[in-house]
Image (cartoon, rainbow, N blue to C red):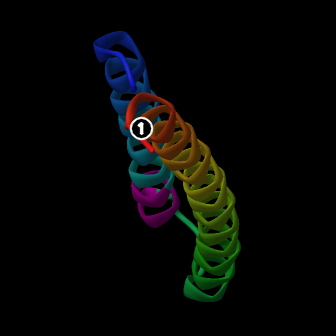
């Protein structure tokens, strides 16, 4: 099972990443440059964010599967045959 510290650390890191993405978007929109450059930067930032999100979701899915497997194994060990 996931401990309270692990959940808090995950929440903190998730919030940090989300804040960085939002901050980058605001900075790009507030920067004085032509609209075409801004749109190009936003597209790049969106691709990066999508890639990072996909990667993180893959990691979470793998971790969840491991935890479920561990829980099922532990349950089988403790249940009578």
Task: State left or right for residue 79 relative to residue 24.
Answer: left
**Can you give x and y, in whole percent of width and height, for residue 54 in the image?**
63, 67
**Can you give x and y, in whole percent of width and height, for residue 7 in the image?**
34, 25
* Residue at image coords 59%, 44%: 63
14 or 57: nearer the eye? 57
Q: Residue 26's quadrant in the figure?
A: bottom left
Magenta segment, which residues? 25-30
The residue sitting at the top extreme is: 5
| Image position of 20 with respect to 26: above or below | above
Task: State left or right for residue 55 relative to residue 3.
Answer: right
* Residue at image coords 48%, 41%: 76
23 or 64: nearer the eye? 64
Q: Which quarter shows the C terminus?
A: top left
Judging by the rendered image, the residue that carries numbered circle 1 is 75
**Can you give x and y, in whole percent of width and height, for residue 52 in the image?**
66, 58
| Image position of 35 with respect to 11: above or below | below
The residue sitting at the bottom extreme is: 36
Q: Residue 46's quadrant in the figure?
A: bottom right
Q: Which quarter shows the N terminus?
A: top left
- Secondary structure of the residue carrying tag 1 is helix
* Residue at image coords 46%, 39%: 71
For the stretch drawn in magenta, the main secondary structure is helix
| Image position of 4 with respect to 76: above or below | above
41 or 68: nearer the eye? 68
Q: Tell me, yes or no, whether the highlighted magenta stretch contains residue 56.
A: no
Count the labels in the image: 1
The residue sitting at the front extreme is: 81
| Image position of 42 with respect to 8: above or below | below
Task: State left or right for residue 75 relative to residue 39.
Answer: left
**Can you give x and y, in whole percent of width and height, for residue 57 in the image?**
56, 60
């Amino acid at each position: 099972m996931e401990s309270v510290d692990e959940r808090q650390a995950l929440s903190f890191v998730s919030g940090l990443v989300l804040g960085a993405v939002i901050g980058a978007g605001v900075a790009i929109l507030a920067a004085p440059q032509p609209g075409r450059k801004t749109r190009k930067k936003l597209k790049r930032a969106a691709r990066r964010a999508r890639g990072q999100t996909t990667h993180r979701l893959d990691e979470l899915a793998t971790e969840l599967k491991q935890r479920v497997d561990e829980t099922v194994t532990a349950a089988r060990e403790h249940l009578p045959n």
